[in-house]
Amino acid sequence: MKRKIAIINQRYGLEVNGGSELYTRQIAERLNQYYDVEVLTSCAVDYIIWDNFYPVGIEMVNQVRVRRFNIEHSRNESVFPGLNDAMHNNPNVTTEISDAWIEQLGPFCPTLVQYVKAHEDDYSLFIVVTYLYYPAAKCIPLIGDKVIFIPTAHEEPFIHFKMYQQVFESAKAFVFLTEEEKRLVEGLFVLENQKKEVMGVGVDIPDKLEAEGFNRFEKTNYLIYVGRIDEGKNCPRLFQYFVEYKRRNPGDLKLILMGKKACAIPRHKDIIPMGFVSEDTKFTGILNAKLLILPSLYESLSIAVLEAMKMGVPVLVNGNCDVLKGHCLKSNAGLYYKNYFEFESCINYMLIHQTVVHQMSVNAKDYVEHYFNWDKIMEKFCNLIEETAEV
């Protein structure tokens, strides 16, 4: 008889597009081959307002059983900013304030927490993905002895809130996506007796990519950004740098943006927003790019960077993000910048030195195959589940 495993994440579904949420679905579908997997989640698709989208109850998503819980209220945008300021101004605020903040941060689904508490004995283990939101913050302290925690943590103000000390230190075992994430978490919390594994994420690329199918851009020299276009990803600074680059370096180079718009995009003839695109368009766009750029300061992994590397496309990332910088240093398949002049120099270097770029391409593919192979990752994951469940 298969072990029954619950996986908790704040959002889950084919319509949900997010890093940790996609990762959760990937591991759920793979673990479902070996275990009786059930996902416990909210009814939301949107991660800001947290309105109910899916119906409450059980449904099957790609052969995985998903149990959804009602969100009792969405985020109150007249209340949340004040609470958020209070938390940032004093990370050690009272429990009353931190409880109000996490409720407004969302998704506020207390029936999920109540279900976990009442049905703890029905599951061999709980796998909880992403530390930040209400389900993780409220569930882990209740069932920590049965939790494998995948925090997807990175350096940001939230992780320094005192309320998360109990969350992290209650978990029995950890899966970290990178060594940088592991070092960060171990430096912030007391984790002396917990099991810890670094095992990353597998990277899936279609077997066939139509290099000639990228519409009117197939013969264009361009850089590409893939992901949510918003301030949290440092996109305004990317736009500022690229506009300045074009002023100082006239030519035909363009910046193509693929992803949902959540901040202003400057009107510029060489900045081309394509909005949300299909997976085929995304992969073809990356394949034909000179390089992929990720300006984000806060990343726990970055699937887009790894997808580009697997296709042999060099990357240019923000050197102030330890995880992204780490990808470049470990792979020797990308460059990083910390200011405009480094940004300009890196682009020009990679556009000119094609022999070096070719070697970067080879290095990139080798790096992803070695560290981000699903077969290797799932073997380690199953071993960790068995070791944790048996103790």
Image (tube, rainbow, N blue to C red):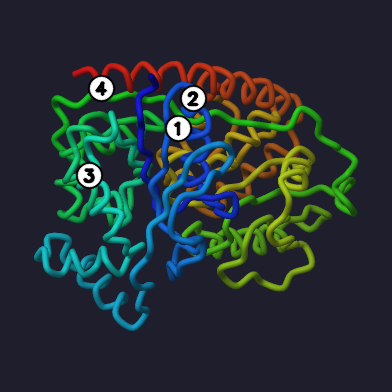
Q: Which residue is mark 3?
A: 140
Question: Vertical placement of 230 versus 163: above or below?
Answer: below
- Where residue 180 appears, as percent x and y from the top left, is 36, 33
**Which residue occupies the foreground of this view, 220 or 157?**
157
Kindly identify the amino acid type of the residue bearing the numbered disc 2.
Answer: Lys
Tell which circle, 4 or 1, labels the residue nearer the N-terminal end: 1
- Where residue 75 appears, as percent x and y from the top left, is 37, 73
Label 4: how many residues lie within 10 Å, few (<14), some (14-19) or many (20+)? Answer: some
Given this view, does label 3 or label 2 mark the residue nearer the observer?
A: 3
Q: Which residue is mark 1?
A: 326
Query: Residue drawn at (38%, 39%), measured in percent from left and top?
Result: 7
C-alpha distance separating marks 1 and 3: 29 Å
C-alpha distance separating marks 3 and 2: 33 Å
Q: Are marks 1 and 3 in contact (CB under 8 Å)?
A: no
C-alpha distance separating marks 4 and 1: 29 Å
Given this view, does label 4 or label 1 mark the residue nearer the observer?
A: 4
Residue 388 is marked as 4
Q: Are marks 4 and 3 in contact (CB under 8 Å)?
A: no
Residue farthest toward the left in the current orientation of the protein: 94
Tell which circle, 3 or 2, labels the residue nearer the N-terminal end: 3
Label 1: how many residues lie within 10 Å, few (<14), some (14-19) or many (20+)? Answer: some
Kindly identify the amino acid type of the residue bearing the numbered disc 1.
Answer: Gly
- Where residue 8 appears, as percent x and y from the top left, is 36, 44
C-alpha distance separating marks 4 and 3: 15 Å
Tell which circle, 4 or 3, labels the residue nearer the N-terminal end: 3
Kindly identify the amino acid type of the residue bearing the numbered disc 3.
Answer: Ile
Kindly identify the amino acid type of the residue bearing the numbered disc 4.
Answer: Thr
Residue 330 is marked as 2
Query: Residue drawn at (38%, 19%), measured in percent from left and top?
Result: 1
